[in-house]
Image (cartoon, rainbow, N blue to C red):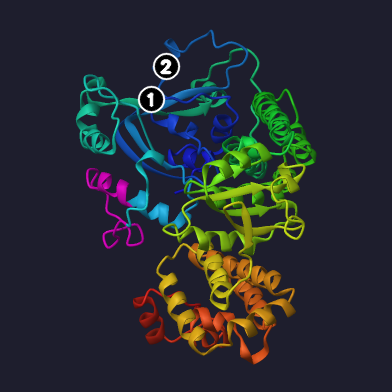
C-alpha cells in the first residue's frame, strides 16, 4: 500500500546503491519502473499498486573461460569499473490506483476499496495469497467517487494494436495476456530486466589480463545509504503536505488574507530548489565516492546540511505549515458554512442586494478572529429547516470595515450573532435550547467520526435523556454559568478523535493515546453527577469499557460489533 518511491523501488527488486541512484535521478527509469515516478497529489490521497513480475530466462558467461581473452574489449576507458556477466529476462507490469480523497475519508477504508478493485488482477497471475492478503470476505462500501480515482499502467511489453489500457477492465485483460506478449518478444525471452555485474578487476584476474592501472572502486556503507533514503522519504512527505496546503488555498483564493498564498509559494520555491540541488549533489557525490575521487564524508555532509536547512527538513516544513493553522481552520469552517447554496457577503453593497431580493433571510455574522463555533452549528441546524427558511446568508465580519452598515441596531452589531432578517428587522436566534446544545456536541464528534452508524446510537441516547433532564430554562442557566464548558468539550472531542484514529489505524501508540483520553474523560464533569455527556451520547456501557482499561470480554465485544458500535479494547 505504500506510495513512497523508495518502497516502490524495493518492490521491483532494486536494492542498495542502485536504489539510491534511482532516487536521486542518476539513473533514469522506463517501462514498468515508471510507476516509481507516479507520486500522490497530496498526503491525504491514497495510492495502491499491483505489480506483476514474469521471469523467463537467465543468460550468463563463464568468466573463467579462456576464450574470453579474444573478445575482451581493450577500449574500456578510464572510468570502467564493472563487467556485465549475466542478464535476467522477462517483463514487469504495474497497475496503480490513486484516490484523491477530497472528502478526507479514513485511509484504511480507501485502501480496502482500492484493494478490492485490484484483487481480480491477482486471479490472472496464479499467485497463492497469504491469509492476510485475501479480501474474499470483504464487501465494497462503494464510498469512492469515480472522478477522484486515477488509473495508471506501466509495462515493459506494451500492446501494439489496442494501445495502452485506459480502464481497470482493460488493465485486467492486459495482465491476462501478458504471458503471451512476453512469448512474442525476443523469441520468448521478453525484455532485459536485470544486469548482474562483477568488478572489472575480478575479470582481469580470472583471465590473467594486465591492462592499464586498476580503477578504484569503493562501496558505500549501508547505514549511509539508509540515512540518505530517509532524507528522500522526508522530502517526498513534505512535498505532499505543502501541496495539500497549496490546494486548499487555491480552492479558497477569494477568502485568503493578504499575501498568504504568496508566502506559501515563496516557501515552496525554496523547498523545491533545495530538493533539486540535493538530488543533484547526491548523484555527483555518489559517482565521486564510488570511483575514489571523494571521501565518504562528503555524503555524510550532505545529510548534515539537510538537517540544518530552514526550508527542507520535515520539522521545519511542519513548523511553517503550522503558522497557517488559524487560516486552515478558518477556511475549513468557511467551506462547511457555505455549502448547499449559502450566500457569502464580504461587503455592505452585496448584502443590500440580498435585502432587496429576499423578504426573509437567516443571517450568520461571524468574525473568525473571535470565532464562535456554536453559532456555526446553530446555523447548520437552521439550514436543515429549509422548508421554513429557504435563504441563508453568511456575513464575513472580518472583511467588512463598518459592520453597522449592515446591522444598524446598536444592541446587535457589537458581537457575532445569528439572526432572522424579516421585512427590514432583525431578531436574535442565538439562544440555545437544551436539545440543541447536546446535538451540537453530538454532531461535532460525528463530523470527525467516519462511522456513520454511530449517529443513530447518539440520537437515541440523547432523546432518552431529554425526556428526564432539566428544563430548557434551567439548562440554559447552567450553560451560562459554565463559561469554559464549550472549550472543555472540544478538548475532549479532540482526544476522542485521536483515540478513534489510533484504533482504526492500529497505531503503536494506541495504549498511550487511550490513557490520555481516559484522563481527559475523568477530568471532564462540569455538572457533577447531574450531567455526563459521554454517558448520554454513548450509553451506560461506556464507562465499563474505560474501567476495564479498554479490554472487554469476547462476548460483549462480538455483541457490540454486531450492533455497529465503537468500543475500546
Nearer the N terminus, badge 2 or badge 1?
A: 1
In magenta stretch: residue 133: yes
Name the spot of residue 201 as percent of width and height, x first.
57, 24
Which segment is the magenta one?
Answer: 116-140
Residue 372, numbered label: none
Q: Is residue 502 visible?
A: no
Residue 61, numbered label: 1
Q: Secondary structure at mark 1?
A: loop
Q: Residue furthest front?
A: 423
Q: Secondary structure at mark 2?
A: helix
- Counting the numbered discs, the total is 2
Q: Is residue 289 left or right of residue 305?
A: left
What residue is rendered at 67% in x and 89% in y?
528
Q: Is residue 411 left or right of residue 568?
A: right
Name the spot of residue 513 as percent of width and height, x first.
62, 70
Name the spot of residue 375 as percent of width and height, x first.
63, 61
Q: Is residue 184 left or right of residue 129?
A: left
Please, is residue 480 above or below residue 343 in the view? Answer: below
Q: Residues within 10 Å of mark 1 (few under 14, many from 20)?
A: few
Are the residues tagged 2 and 1 within 8 Å (C-beta)?
Answer: yes
Residue 68, numbered label: 2
2 vs 1, front mark = 1
Amino acid at each position: 500500500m505504500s506510495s513512497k518511491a523508495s518502497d516502490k523501488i524495493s518492490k521491483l527488486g532494486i536494492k542498495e546503491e542502485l536504489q539510491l541512484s534511482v532516487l536521486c535521478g542518476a539513473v533514469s527509469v522506463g517501462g514498468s519502473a515508471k510507476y516509481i515516478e507516479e507520486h500522490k497529489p497530496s498526503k491525504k490521497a491514497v495510492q495502491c499498486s499491483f505489480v506483476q513480475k514474469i521471469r523467463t530466462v537467465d543468460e550468463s558467461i563463464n568468466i573463467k573461460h579462456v576464450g574470453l581473452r579474444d573478445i575482451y574489449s581493450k577500449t574500456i576507458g578510464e572510468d570502467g569499473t564493472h563487467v556485465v556477466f549475466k542478464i535476467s529476462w522477462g517483463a514487469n507490469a504495474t497497475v496503480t490506483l490513486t484516490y484523491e480523497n477530497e472528502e478526507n475519508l479514513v485511509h484504511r477504508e480507501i485502501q480496502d476499496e482500492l484493494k478490492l478493485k485490484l484483487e481480480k488482477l491477482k486471479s490472472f497471475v496464479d499467485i497463492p495469497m497469504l491469509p492476510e492478503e485475501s479480501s474474499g470476505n470483504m464487501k465494497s462500501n462503494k464510498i469512492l467517487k469515480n472522478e477522484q480515482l486515477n488509473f495508471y499502467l506501466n509495462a515493459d511489453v506494451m500492446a501494439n494494436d489496442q494501445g495502452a489500457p485506459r480502464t481497470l477492465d482493460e488493465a485486467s485483460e492486459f495482465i491476462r495476456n501478458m504471458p503471451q506478449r512476453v512469448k512474442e518478444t525476443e523469441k520468448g525471452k521478453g525484455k532485459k530486466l536485470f544486469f548482474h555485474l562483477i568488478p572489472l578487476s575480478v575479470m582481469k584476474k580470472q583471465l590473467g589480463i594486465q591492462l592499464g592501472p586498476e580503477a578504484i572502486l569503493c562501496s558505500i556503507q549501508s547505514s549511509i545509504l539508509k540515512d540518505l533514503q530517509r532524507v528522500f522519504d522526508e522530502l517526498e512527505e513534505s512535498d505532499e503536505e505543502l501541496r495539500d496546503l497549496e490546494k486548499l488555498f487555491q480552492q479558497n483564493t477569494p477568502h485568503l488574507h493578504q499575501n498568504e498564498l504568496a508566502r506559501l509559494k515563496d516557501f515552496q520555491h525554496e523547498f523545491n530548489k533545495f530538493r533539486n540541488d540535493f538530488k543533484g549533489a547526491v548523484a555527483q557525490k555518489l559517482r565521486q565516492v564510488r570511483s575514489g575521487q571523494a571521501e565518504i564524508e562528503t555524503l555524510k555532509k550532505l545529510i548534515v546540511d539537510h538537517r540544518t536547512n530552514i526550508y527542507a527538513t520535515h520539522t521545519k516544513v511542519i513548523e511553517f505549515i503550522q503558522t497557517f493553522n488559524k487560516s486552515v481552520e478558518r477556511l475549513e469552517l468557511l467551506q462547511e458554512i457555505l455549502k448547499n447554496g449559502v450566500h457569502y457577503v464580504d461587503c455592505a453593497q452585496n448584502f443590500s442586494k440580498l435585502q432587496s431580493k429576499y423578504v426573509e433571510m437567516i443571517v450568520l455574522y461571524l468574525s473568525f478572529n473571535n470565532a464562535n463555533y456554536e453559532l456555526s452549528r446553530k446555523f447548520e441546524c437552521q439550514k436543515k429547516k429549509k422548508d421554513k427558511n429557504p435563504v441563508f446568508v453568511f456575513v464575513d465580519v472580518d472583511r467588512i470595515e463598518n459592520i453597522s452598515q449592515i446591522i444598524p441596531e446598536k444592541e446587535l452589531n457589537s458581537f457575532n450573532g445569528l439572526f432572522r432578517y424579516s421585512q427590514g428587522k432583525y431578531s436574535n436566534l442565538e439562544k440555545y435550547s437544551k436539545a440543541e446544545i447536546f446535538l451540537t456536541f453530538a454532531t461535532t464528534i460525528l463530523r470527525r467520526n467516519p462511522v456513520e452508524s454511530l449517529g443513530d446510537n447518539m440520537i437515541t441516547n440523547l432523546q432518552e435523556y431529554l425526556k428526564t433532564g432539566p428544563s430548557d430554562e434551567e439548562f440554559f442557566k447552567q450553560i451560562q454559568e459554565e463559561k469554559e464548558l464549550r472549550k472543555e468539550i472540544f478538548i475532549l472531542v479532540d482526544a476522542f478523535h485521536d483515540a478513534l484514529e489510533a484504533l482504526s489505524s492500529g497505531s503503536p501508540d494506541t495504549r498511550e493515546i487511550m490513557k490520555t483520553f481516559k484522563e481527559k474523560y475523568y477530568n471532564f464533569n462540569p455538572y457533577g453527577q447531574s450531567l455526563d455527556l459521554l454517558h448520554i451520547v454513548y450509553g451506560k456501557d461506556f464507562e465499563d469499557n474505560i474501567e476495564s482499561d479498554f479490554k472487554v470480554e469476547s462476548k460483549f465485544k462480538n455483541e457490540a460489533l454486531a450492533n455497529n458500535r465503537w468500543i475500546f479494547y
